[in-house]
Amino acid sequence: MILNTQYSILSIDTSTQVCSVAIHINGILAANIETYKENSHSENLTLMIDQVSKFAGIQLSEISAFALSRGPGSYTGLRIGCSALKGLCFALDKPLIAISTLQLMAHGLKPMAENVDFICPMIDAKRMEVYQGLFDKFGNVVEIEKPLVLEKSSFNDYSDSMILFAGNGSDKCKSLFSNSKFIFITGYHPLAKNMGDLAYQAFLQNDFVDVAYFEPEYLKDFYTSAKVLE
């Protein structure tokens, strides 16, 4: 590998109500754009991709790879992001990188986690359910990501640990958990600007997904109406 080669990666996250696009060069942020308008991903994403490429001064044909947060998260949002990047990868013959949304969140939280034992990003999955993963303060996986129905006893095994909770699912925990060692960050979202290092390391290791067969990671089945019990 030539050490002074510059690799540019365009990343997107559409897993929650926030839609974000970023370009990193060798893992360093070159440009990013975010919109917090809910239910607008389908109308904004293509325009945002064009805008961020102009901000960075890089044409889409010059991008080395495309990266996206693979889920869990909003079914519709993940589908929109997946379809958009698959189209670009096919059209431009570029590889696709998929990063766990919860890992992306944990990575972005590391600067705030110096004095905690664990990081627990959570994404709202409706009612009292969340998608959650548990990471150490360095972003390493402690428990695999999973859907979780929140109860007062959900984190009893970690009652002596200082845990940093964040994400739009963590708001549900505040009324359940009274442990003074549990810290909550509000208004935190998975963002493409935090994907740079993760995507760059995946790129260097040729850790790509099959563009034709890749599907987002939903963690549970999606139902458009009430499930019929047989």
Image: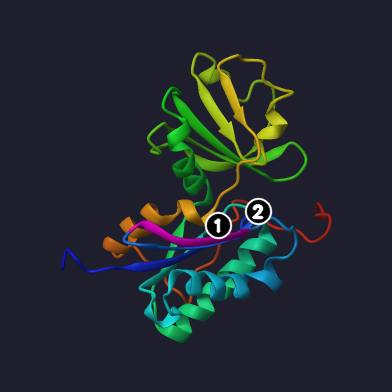
Give residue 111's mark. none
Left-right relation of 24 to 228: left
Left-right relation of 28 to 161: left
Q: Tell me residue 82's x, y (percent).
A: 56, 69
The residue furthest bottom is 91
Q: Is residue 155 in view? A: no
Tell me the kind of residue under disc 2: Thr
Residue at the image point whose x is 47% and y is 86% from the top = 91
Q: Which residue is mark 1?
A: 217
Measured Cα–Cα span from mark 2 to mark 1: 14 Å
Residue 3 among those drawn in magenta:
no
**Res 205 → quadrant:** bottom left
Q: Which residue is mark 2?
A: 16
- Position of the N terminus, as image quadrant, is bottom left
Q: Please give the range of residues in magenta.
A: 27-34
Left-right relation of 88 to 58: right
Number of numbered labels in the structure image: 2
Considering the whole magenta stretch, tell me its main secondary structure: strand
